[in-house]
Amino acid sequence: MHYSKTLLCIGAWFLLLLTLPAYADDASRDREIAERFKICDVNQDGKLTQEEAKGCMPRIYDHFSIIDSNNQGYVTVAQIQAMANR
């Protein structure tokens, strides 16, 4: 029984890794985030609201309240990058 649980966990981790984008380093990931942020920030104010993130950055939308820890109603590219680099 223990053996099958171990295989199941390994399989789950493998599937998770397949769904994550491959980045050579934090700088590559930060550039990708900045590019996506710029596209999604419709009014170009440097702030991404939950509504702006909704259709454009679904992971940010799903975790918006965690990233917007100060409850400002928006997140910045630096906040998203910091969260991604944790």
Image: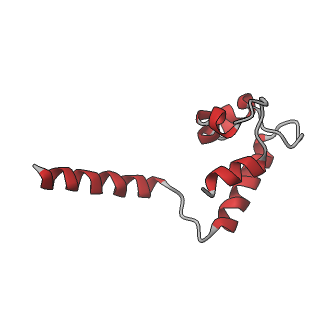
User: As drawn, which residue projects farthest toward the left?
Assistant: 1
Quadrant, the C terminus: bottom right
Residue situated in front as seen by the camera: 23 or 66: 66
Q: Is residue 77 above or below residue 67?
A: below
The image's colouring method is secondary structure
Determine the residue positioned at 41% across, 52% down. Answer: 16
- Left or right of 47: which side holds 25? left
Q: Position of residue 37 (x, y in %)?
A: 75, 47
Determine the residue positioned at 76% across, 54% down. Answer: 34
User: As drawn, which residue projects farthest toward the front?
Assistant: 70
Residue situated in front as seen by the camera: 70 or 17: 70
Residue situated in front as seen by the camera: 43 or 77: 77
Q: Position of residue 35 (x, y in %)?
A: 75, 54
Q: Is residue 27 above or below residue 2?
A: below
Residue 74 falls in image quadrant? top right
User: As drawn, which residue projects farthest toward the bottom?
Assistant: 24
Q: Is residue 77 above or below residue 85?
A: above
Q: Position of residue 69 (x, y in %)?
A: 69, 36
- Tag count: 0
Q: Is residue 4 above or below residue 23?
A: above
Q: Position of residue 38 (x, y in %)?
A: 80, 48
Determine the residue positioned at 83% across, 39% down. Answer: 47
- Left or right of 62: which side holds 36? right
Residue 40 falls in image quadrant? top right
Residue 71 falls in image quadrant? top right
Determine the residue positioned at 66% across, 32% down. Answer: 54
